[in-house]
Image (spheres, coloured by chain):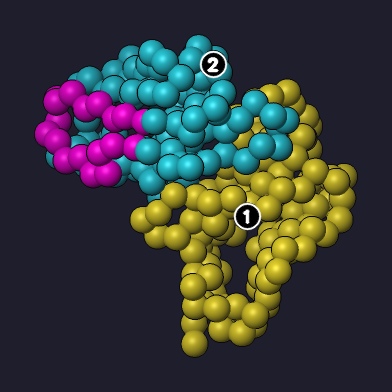
Chain colours: A yellow, B cyan
């Protein structure tokens, strides 16, 4: 199978830092994407990792460890507008469609 | 760039009725995907096309579901007859051929309610 696991829900305080983890089965791994989805809207692309290490984009960073089958999305200086679901998606062998995790619903509170 | 366009945004229908969802991908994108999203199962791939040809429809739940892509700028997903368990948000997405790291671009989805 191609199970992708991430926590169902998380809550964090405005201005804080939050880390959302994602684990996946490593066989055939090609790359990992993070998407953001606000309630009632479409998922939008945040980041892509294919090599080990940290990719930074402003307040958002994404980390990958290929050998461990592990990624995380790091959100800094949280804002209320960051309340959304965050979807981890993996590209497996060949040019096959992305497989999505069920998403982590993040609530940012004052 | 208008993005991926789906219609209708909302559809409410009675069990047994036929439902047709429509999608216009981003111009120049070679791949088109239909996903279904529910709270319980998340985003599930139903079918995808490459250059208008269906490549993998193993995610289509049953024969009640069918999808077509008659040309590069239009695709439909049809459910006939519809059932209450089909209630979900249906997303269409497209991406360019590029490499496998080309991100998906999603439409705004169709929220289907079958009563």
Res. B62 image quadrant:
top left
Q: What mark, if any, has residue A46 been given in the picture?
A: 1
Q: Position of residue B78 (x, y in %)?
A: 29, 22
Residue B12 inside the magenta-drawn segment:
yes
Q: Is residue B109 left or right of residue A94?
A: left
Q: Pointer 1 and pointer 2: residues touching (CB < 8 Å)?
A: no
Given the image, what chain letter belongs to the residue carrying mark 2?
Answer: B
Residue B47 inside the magenta-drawn segment:
no
Can residue B87 be spotted in the picture?
A: no
The residue tagged 2 is B51
Given the image, what chain letter belongs to the residue carrying mark 1?
Answer: A
Residue displayed at 71% across by 69% down: A58
Q: What mark, if any, has residue A72 been given in the picture?
A: none
Residue displayed at 85% across by 46% down: A51
Q: Position of residue B71 (x, y in %)?
A: 42, 15
- Under circle 2, the secondary element is loop
- Compared to residue A50, the image places residue A62 above or below, namely below
Q: Is A59 in front, or is B26?
A: B26
Instruction: Work out how far the residue at label 1 is from the one at label 2, CA to CA, in angstroms.
Output: 26 Å
Q: Is residue B110 left or right of residue B107?
A: left
């Amino acid at each position: 199978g191609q199970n992708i696991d991430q926590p169902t829900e998380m809550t964090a305080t405005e201005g804080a830092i939050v880390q959302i983890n994602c684990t996946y089965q490593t066989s055939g791994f090609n790359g990992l994407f993070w998407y953001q989805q606000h309630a009632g809207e479409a998922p939008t692309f945040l980041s892509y990792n294919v090599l080990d290490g940290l990719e930074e984009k402003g307040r958002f960073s994404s980390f990958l460890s290929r050998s461990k089958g592990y990624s995380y999305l790091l959100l800094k200086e949280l804002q209320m507008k960051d309340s959304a679901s965050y979807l981890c998606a993996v590209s497996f062998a060949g040019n096959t469609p992305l497989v999505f995790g069920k998403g982590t619903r993040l609530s940012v509170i004052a | 760039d208008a993005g991926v366009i789906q219609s209708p945004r909302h559809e409410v229908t009675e069990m047994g009725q036929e439902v047709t969802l429509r999608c216009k991908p981003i111009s120049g994108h070679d791949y088109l995907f239909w996903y279904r999203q529910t709270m319980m199962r998340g985003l599930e791939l139903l079918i995808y096309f490459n250059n208008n040809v269906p490549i993998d429809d193993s995610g289509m739940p049953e024969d009640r579901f069918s999808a077509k892509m008659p040309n590069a700028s239009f695709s439909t997903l049809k459910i006939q007859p519809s059932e209450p368990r089909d209630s979900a948000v249906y997303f269409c997405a497209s991406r360019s051929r590029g490499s496998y790291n080309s991100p998906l671009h999603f439409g705004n989805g169709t929220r289907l309610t079958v009563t």
